[in-house]
Image (tube, helix red, strand yellow):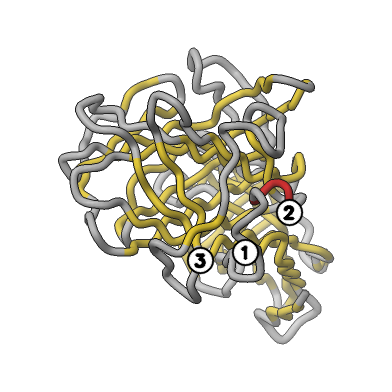
């Protein structure tokens, strides 16, 4: 765990960011004669049987680092179905990354899950998204209960990055494929029907499937990394009397106080300014519709005094 102190200004505000690695798996330390869930508590087979036909062994056919990876396949006798079990987590921010390799002519599929429960011989859960890699080299998705409207490319026969960013406090998620921002959505929505779901992170499901149906699914996964970011000790300096509402905010906020040429700035947690206004009078409405969802710091300076508050923006 490491702590980064972001001292944004000379007065009393300090934000503490703590990042913890939850999973770091390259598969190289595993043997090839026992299944991955049989060797690691981070993984389960969907069948809830660590040695069932859907469980996966390490292989040396492809590897991004070292000599081994996790091979996900689809065929009539043995379709693999592996679950990376997380939490369940209901707070904080999570970055889930891995390397992925899809051979020419093959397809692939994975999903992220709000909930995942293994009940002896079967599993149930609530889906957050479905990501489909077609055998023609394109991929699309289903989020918030709706199929994706755009189809984006991905490379065959080479390793590429997959990165999911899940911000539970802001109830939002983003996905990047091969370095290209692919989509963002309201995380908690139940992907089955678009209804209100569970704002929780519980699993990543790697399933042997090709959505085209013309070829079997086949892909490899390596170097899985899951990191959690916590913000502890986000404090407010209350030398200036003001109030902000609503907070969490959507498209706008109202700042109430007794202002006279008072500078106001909204900053992200790296200290980068994303909005600024000059406050006068007792009320100021600030447009937040163009600010991405997340956690921010709102600073007001008046008569040589400063106030800093935490601001959460959701859309």
**For the view shown, which residue lies furthest in the bottom direction?**
10
Q: Position of residue 313 (x, y in %)?
A: 57, 46
Residue that label 1 marks: 25
* Residue at (39, 63) in percent of width and height: 62
Labels 2 & 1 near each other (Cβ < 8 A): yes
Circle count: 3
Residue that label 2 marks: 40
Asked whether residue 297 appears in the rendered view, the answer is no
302 is higher (above) or lower (below) than 207 = below
The tag on residue 68 is 3
Circle 1: element type? strand
Q: With 117 as the anchor, is 105 left or right in this view?
A: left
Select label 3 or label 1 by which is in front: 3
* Residue at (65, 43) in percent of width and height: 168
Q: Earlier in the sequence, mark 3 or mark 1?
A: 1
Asked whether residue 71 appears in the rendered view, the answer is yes
Q: CA distance from mark 2 to mark 1?
A: 10 Å
Q: Earlier in the sequence, mark 3 or mark 2?
A: 2
145 is higher (above) or lower (below) than 74 = above
Mark 3 Cα shell of 10 Å, populated few (<14), some (14-19), many (≥20): many
* Residue at (30, 28) in percent of width and height: 211
Q: CA distance from mark 3 to mark 2?
A: 15 Å
Q: Position of residue 248 (x, y in %)?
A: 65, 41
Q: With 87 as the anchor, is 53 left or right in this view?
A: left
Q: With 3 as the anchor, is 65 left or right in this view?
A: left
Circle 3: element type? loop
Q: Earlier in the sequence, mark 2 or mark 1?
A: 1
Q: CA distance from mark 3 to mark 1?
A: 11 Å
Q: Closer to the camera, 189 or 245?
A: 189
* Residue at (33, 64) in percent of width and height: 159
Q: Position of residue 1 (x, y in %)?
A: 77, 74
């Amino acid at each position: 765990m490491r702590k980064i102190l972001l001292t944004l200004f000379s007065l009393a505000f300090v934000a503490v960011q703590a990042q913890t690695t939850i999973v770091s798996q390259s598969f190289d330390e595993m043997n090839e004669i026992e299944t991955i869930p049989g060797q690691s508590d981070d993984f389960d087979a969907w069948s809830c049987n660590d040695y069932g036909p859907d469980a996966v062994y390490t292989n040396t056919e492809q590897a991004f680092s070292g000599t081994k990876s996790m091979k996900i396949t689809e065929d009539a006798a043995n379709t693999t179905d592996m679950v990376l079990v997380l939490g369940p987590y209901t707070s904080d921010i999570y970055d889930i990354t891995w390397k992925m390799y899809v051979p020419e002519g093959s397809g692939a599929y994975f999903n992220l899950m709000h909930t995942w429960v293994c009940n002896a011989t079967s599993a149930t859960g609530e889906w957050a998204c479905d990501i489909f890699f077609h055998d023609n080299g394109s991929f699309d998705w289903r989020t918030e209960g709706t199929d994706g409207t755009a189809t984006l490319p991905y490379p065959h026969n080479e390793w590429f990055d997959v990165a999911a960013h899940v911000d539970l406090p802001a109830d939002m998620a983003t996905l990047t494929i091969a370095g290209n921002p692919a989509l963002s959505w309201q995380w908690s929505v139940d992907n089955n029907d678009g209804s209100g779901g569970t704002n929780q992170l519980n699993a990543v499901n790697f399933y042997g499937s090709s959505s085209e149906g013309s070829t079997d699914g086949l892909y490899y996964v390596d170097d899985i990394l899951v990191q959690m970011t916590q913000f502890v000790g986000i404090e407010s300096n209350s030398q200036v009397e003001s109030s902000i509402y609503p907070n969490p905010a959507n498209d706008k906020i109202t700042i109430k106080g007794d202002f006279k040429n008072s500078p106001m700035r909204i900053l992200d947690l790296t200290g980068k300014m994303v909005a600024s206004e000059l406050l006068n009078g007792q009320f100021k409405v600030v447009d937040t519709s163009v600010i991405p969802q997340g956690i921010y710091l709102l600073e007001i300076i008046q008569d040589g005094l400063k106030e800093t508050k935490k601001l959460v923006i959701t859309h």
